Image (cartoon, grey):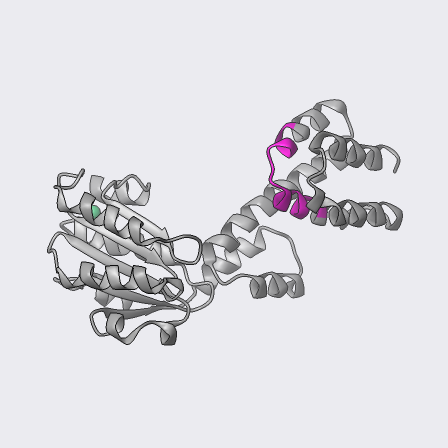
Amino acid sequence: MINNFFNLPKKPHALIVKQYPLSDFVSFLKQFMKSIVCTNHGCNLCPWCKKIEQEQYYDLAIFDAKIDLKKNDIIETQNKFIKSGLEEKNIKFLVIKNIDFANKQVLNCLLKFIEKQDPSVYVVFSTFNYPNILPTIKSRCSTISITRNNEIIKCFLDKTELNSQEKNEIMQCFNDFNDLKNMITEFVEFNNLINEMLAKNNIAIFLKTLKIFKSLTYEEINLFLEIFKQKVDAKAKMKIIDYQKKLFLNPNKSLLFDNIINLIKNR
Ligand SMILES: [Zn+2]
């Protein structure tokens, strides 16, 4: 059904993408853009398709209403889009994720934007909560649903070496496929590092890991400690839990890392 959609000769200029949990909006968006910009409805081979795949298509403004979206963002985009595009194709995309979180001012602004029906502009909204979208927006947009791709998710989760119960638990924590993907990528990286530290137990690997450790956010450090915790004895585990509890105090990362090294050395 989605493939039929990409092959339509004319794509809607205002589209709502109804997302189910763990559906991959980024991949959908890329394919949608390719199907419009590429003369072959998205061949995945031509320079335009490659440009979009590598996220280097510049006539694209993307916002997340859940994080931060102001009326001014829309007005600025509108002003930018009035001029001819940066890309020679002169096809522009405005994308707003989680449109159901947008405030009234933003929505009014968007309504005017859609009503102008500029033929060079495509507006795409995504949502996990379709019923919460204003009827005035719905009536001006086409709608498509995207579900999750279990094969791809399974491939990602298999990299973690978690058991099936743990995999299920992780899947429950995420709605957004990209958040899950990023977390798993980090998980695999941390898991390999920790295994290497525990196996080699030498200064070279500690220094390498320290460098990475210092660049992590506290949220990432929490994930690092979570993985580490599973690989040590009960006494060390208690200490790690204690470090995790104190992460909100933004402790010195080098000192925290020293403590972790000591736990490894004193095994
Ligand atoms: Zn192409």
Image quadrant holding the N terminus, namely bottom left
Number of numbered markers: 0
Q: Position of residue 124 (x, y in %)?
A: 27, 59
Which percent across, then down, holds residue 18? 35, 69
Left or right: residue 216 versus residue 249 is: left
The spot of residue 60 in percent (x, y) is: 26, 46
Q: Nearer the viewer, residue 153 or 176?
A: 176
Residue that appears at 77% across and 44% down:
243
Residue at the outermost front position: 105
Per the rendered image, the range of residues in magenta is 211-225
Location of residue 246 with respect to 193 vertically, above or below: below
Q: Is residue 267 magenta?
A: no
| Left or right: 8 in relation to 260 | left
Does any portion of residue 236 appear in the rendered image? yes
Q: Quadrant of residue 83?
A: top left
Dominant secondary structure of the magenta stretch? Answer: helix
| 25 lies above or below 219 | below
Q: Tell me the residue at 40%/64% (across/down).
A: 101
Picture quadrant where residue 102 is located:
bottom left
**Horizontal placement of 256 versus 94: left or right?**
right
Residue 215 placement, left or right of 95:
right
Quadrant in which the C terminus appears: top right
Task: Classify 207 as above or below 52.
Answer: above
Residue 90 in view in this figure: no
Place of residue 194 in the rendered image (x, y in percent of width and height, measured from the top left): 70, 39
The front one of 25 and 48 is 25
